Amino acid sequence: MTGARVIPLRWPAVVAVTVVGVVGLVAFTWPFFVTGDFARDHGNDAPWLFALLLGLLAVVCLAEVTAGRLDAKTIAVLGVAAAAGGALRLLSAGTAGLEPMFFVVIVAGRVLGPGVGFVSGALAVTTGALLTGGVGPWLPFQMICAGGIGLGAGLLPVRSGGWVERWVLAAYALVTGLAYGLFMNLWFWPFLGVNAPTGMGFVPGAPLLENLGHYGLFYLSTSLGWDLPRGLLNAVLVLLAGPALLRVFRRAARRAAFGVPVVFAPPGAPAALQDTGGRR
C-alpha cells in the first residue's frame, strides 16, 4: 500500500493549508522581495502576522471539522501526538539543537495523513511552548514550520512498511531538521541591524542575490551547527524507534476505524451486527 494515509486531505483543508502556506511563505521571505523604503517603513509590521497566522491555523482545523475528518477519535489521537511532541520538547528544550519532537510529528503525519499531520505539528509546538514558557512572536512561525513537516510526511509517495519506508522517513527527518532552522532564522534575521555579523545582515533594498548571500553566510556560521544535530537525531530516532511507533499509530488507527461509517442497527438486527455498532 502506498502512502498509508489513514485520514485523507479533503478539499476544504487543501484550500486552508494552501492559504496558510502562501501567507507563511510571504511572512518568511518578504525581506528578499521588497524595496528598501517598504522594508524601513513596514518591517516592524511583521509581528502583526501573529494573529493572522493563528487565525489561518484555526481555519485549517475548522476545515477538517466541517469535512468530518476531526471527530472525537481523531481529536483523541491528535491529543496524544501533541502531548508526546510537547513532552519531548520539554525534555530537550532545543539544547544544542536537539529536538526529538519532530520524530513524533513525522510519524503522526505519515500514518494519519497530511491534514492531521499539519495540525499535529502545529499543536505539538504550541504544547511545547506552553510547557517551556516559549510563547512569543516566533511561535506562529514555529507552528507553520512544524505543521509543514507533518504535512510533508503525510504526502511522501512511498509504500508503507519495510526498510524503504524507514530510510525515506529518516532522510526526510534529516532534511526537514535542516530546513526548519533555515526558515526559522528568517523571522528575526531582517531585524538584527547592526547586531548582525559583518557581511551577514539584511540590507534593505539590496539586490536579491546580495541578501541571499548575506543570509547564506549567516545560516552557515550561526545556525547549521544547531540544525544538523536536530536532523541527525530525528533521523536516528526514525531508524531505531520508527518501526515501533509506526506500528503503534497504525494499530490505533485500525482500532479507531477512521472513515468507517457508523450505522445504527435496527431493532431485531443480528447480535453480531449490534456488537459492532452496525459496521460490517
Image: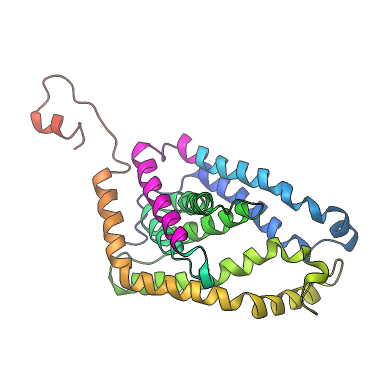
Q: Residue furthest top?
A: 267
The quarter of the picture where the C terminus appears is: top left
Tell me: 160 left or right of 277: right
Compared with 57, 276 (above or below) is: above
Q: Residue furthest right?
A: 37
**Residue 72: x %, y % from top left:** 36, 36
Question: Of 147 and 225, which appears nearest the observer?
Answer: 225
Region rendered in magenta: 63-91
Colour pattern: rainbow
**Residue 236 visible in this rendered orientation of the protein:** yes
Tell me: 148 left or right of 200: left
Which residue sits at x=19%, y=25%? 265
Compared with 36, 66 (above or below) is: above
The number of callouts visible is 0
Question: Can residue 194 be found in the magenta stretch?
Answer: no
Compared with 95, 130 (above or below) is: above
Q: Residue 261 appears in which quarter of the rendering?
A: top left
**Residue 82: x %, y % from top left:** 43, 50
**Residue 202 visible in this rendered orientation of the protein:** no
